Image: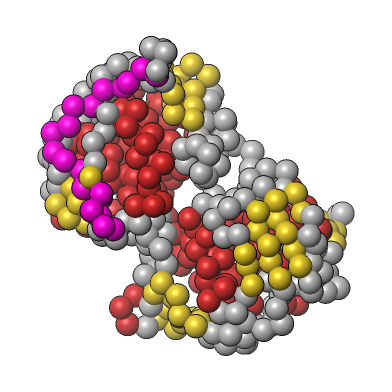
């Protein structure tokens, strides 16, 4: 198990390019199953999650080639197996993304219980409902075995919740389904948009990209092509927090500011200052962070909501660290995952001033001066990431045990922050 040793107090400063969006590539790899010719993906993050997805692609019979400059070439023409390796599925929740393409192409798919972060109950009902709306059948004795005698479009699919996994699987299943499919209450996060835009680039007909109503006209063939994975807005959000809480000056290049605008609006509730210059976001040094009251003078809040109506759930832990570093009080809420805020105990071991008032709400009483100590990484990836950010601002040395979970999404975490001035080492 990896241990991070971080000596805090150094400003996170410099110029950085964010990592590619891990949530994009773990959907794009299964999507390549439906391409009739090879596809090449560039700007690929080689996190442990991505490596598991590539292993599954190979286990199904596909060919994976590693090219220069971080590119990968996927050839699905040799895929001849429809059962997702159950041991690999346990390692990665995104393994479930192979359901849609396998059912679409072969009329059958089977997988085991998928792994992932311990965020509480994470049902797959929306995903299964979407596939059955296209004509798939679920084995009542084994919900992980799905068959179909040709998928057919459905122009009235209402998702029970704005599920990213459900939307992406449904999009993948519908691109070659016969006829027209319309998905209402569709997720529209940047990685969902990236998947749809990739499909359109190789011959799909998807309309309404970036909205919660997607219209998909099925096509018979999808050609090959090249696609560059978009930058990760969660990584960008974390970099901003790291600079702000350590007093550093940071320029983030290739940040797609349009993806960050409403996140920055929420950060403004904590008085965070920023400048946008083209595709770059600049964070000025030595900011005075202060939680602002709302217009009526009451304690404000940051609440997790599906994109773009609220704050991204994956950035709630980092927002909590930012808020704890600021003066005053603010409520941080997440009704989407019932266990995400449990890591408050870990932050409080580092002398944070945070009260967990319910499983879904924390209140900060800042400013907190984090203090280095020995902690175990929470078993939720973004919470572990947030603890590491807090360590950059802490007085003294922090040891984060079992830090391997951070590599699932941030394979270059140590090297990136070393270049930005952090005193960090992995053992």
Residue for point 83% across, 74% down: 150
Left or right position of 108 against 344: right
Front in this rendered view, residue 159 or 403: 159
Front in this rendered view, residue 59 or 160: 160
What kind of secondary structure does the magenta stretch mostly adopt?
loop
Q: Position of residue 17 (x, y in %)?
A: 26, 59
Q: Position of residue 64 (x, y in %)?
A: 49, 81
So how many labels did they put on this image? 0
Q: Which residues are magenta?
A: 276-294
Front in this rendered view, residue 140 or 214: 214
Q: Name the quadrant containing residue 263.
A: top left
Front in this rendered view, residue 95 or 127: 127
Magenta span contains residue 291: yes
Residue for point 39% across, 69% down: 44
Residue for point 26% across, 57% down: 278
Residue for point 13% across, 38% down: 285
Asked whether the viewer can see residue 39, the reply is: yes
Q: Position of residue 45 (x, y in %)?
A: 38, 65
Relative to 150, say whether 296 is above or below: above
Relative to 281, say whether 107 is above or below: below
Magenta span contains residue 253: no
């Amino acid at each position: 198990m990896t241990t991070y040793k971080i000596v805090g107090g150094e400003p996170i400063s410099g110029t950085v390019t964010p990592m590619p969006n891990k949530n994009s590539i773990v959907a794009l790899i299964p999507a390549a199953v439906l391409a009739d010719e090879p596809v090449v993906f560039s700007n690929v993050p080689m996190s442990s999650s991505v490596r598991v997805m590539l292993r599954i692609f190979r286990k199904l019979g596909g060919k994976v080639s590693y090219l220069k400059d971080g590119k990968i070439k996927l050839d699905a023409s040799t895929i001849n197996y429809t059962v997702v390796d159950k041991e690999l599925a346990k390692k990665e929740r995104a393994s479930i993304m192979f359901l849609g393409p396998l059912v679409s192409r072969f009329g059958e798919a089977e997988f085991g219980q998928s792994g992932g972060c311990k965020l509480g109950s994470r049902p797959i009902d929306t995903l299964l409902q979407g596939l059955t709306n296209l004509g798939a059948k679920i084995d009542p004795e084994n919900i992980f075995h799905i068959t179909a005698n040709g998928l057919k479009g459905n122009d009235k699919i209402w998702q029970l919740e704005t599920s990213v996994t459900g939307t992406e699987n449904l999009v993948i299943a519908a691109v070659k389904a016969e006829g027209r499919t319309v998905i209402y209450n569709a997720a529209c996060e940047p990685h969902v948009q990236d998947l749809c835009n990739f499909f359109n680039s190789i011959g799909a007909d998807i309309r309404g990209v970036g909205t919660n109503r997607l219209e998909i006209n099925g096509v018979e063939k999808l050609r090959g092509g090249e696609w560059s994975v978009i930058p990760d807005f969660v990584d960008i959000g974390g970099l901003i927090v790291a600079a702000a809480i350590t007093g550093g000056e940071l320029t983030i290049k290739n940040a797609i500011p349009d993806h960050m605008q409403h996140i920055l609006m929420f950060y403004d509730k904590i008085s965070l200052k920023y400048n946008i210059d083209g595709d770059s976001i600049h964070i000025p040094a030595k900011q005075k962070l202060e939680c602002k009251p709302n217009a009526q003078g009451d304690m404000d809040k940051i609440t997790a909501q599906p994109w773009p109506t609220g704050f991204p759930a994956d950035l709630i832990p980092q927002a909590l660290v930012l808020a704890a570093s600021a003066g005053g009080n603010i409520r941080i809420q997440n009704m989407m995952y019932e266990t995400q805020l449990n890591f408050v105990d870990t932050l409080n071991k580092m002398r944070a001033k945070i009260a967990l008032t319910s499983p879904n709400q924390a209140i900060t009483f800042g400013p907190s001066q984090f203090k280095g100590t020995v902690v175990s990484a929470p078993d939720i990836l973004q919470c572990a990431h947030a603890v590491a950010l807090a360590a950059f601002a802490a007085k003294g040395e922090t040891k984060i045990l079992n830090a391997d979970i951070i590599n699932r999404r941030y394979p270059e975490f140590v090297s990136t922050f070393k270049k930005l001035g952090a005193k960090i080492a992995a053992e």
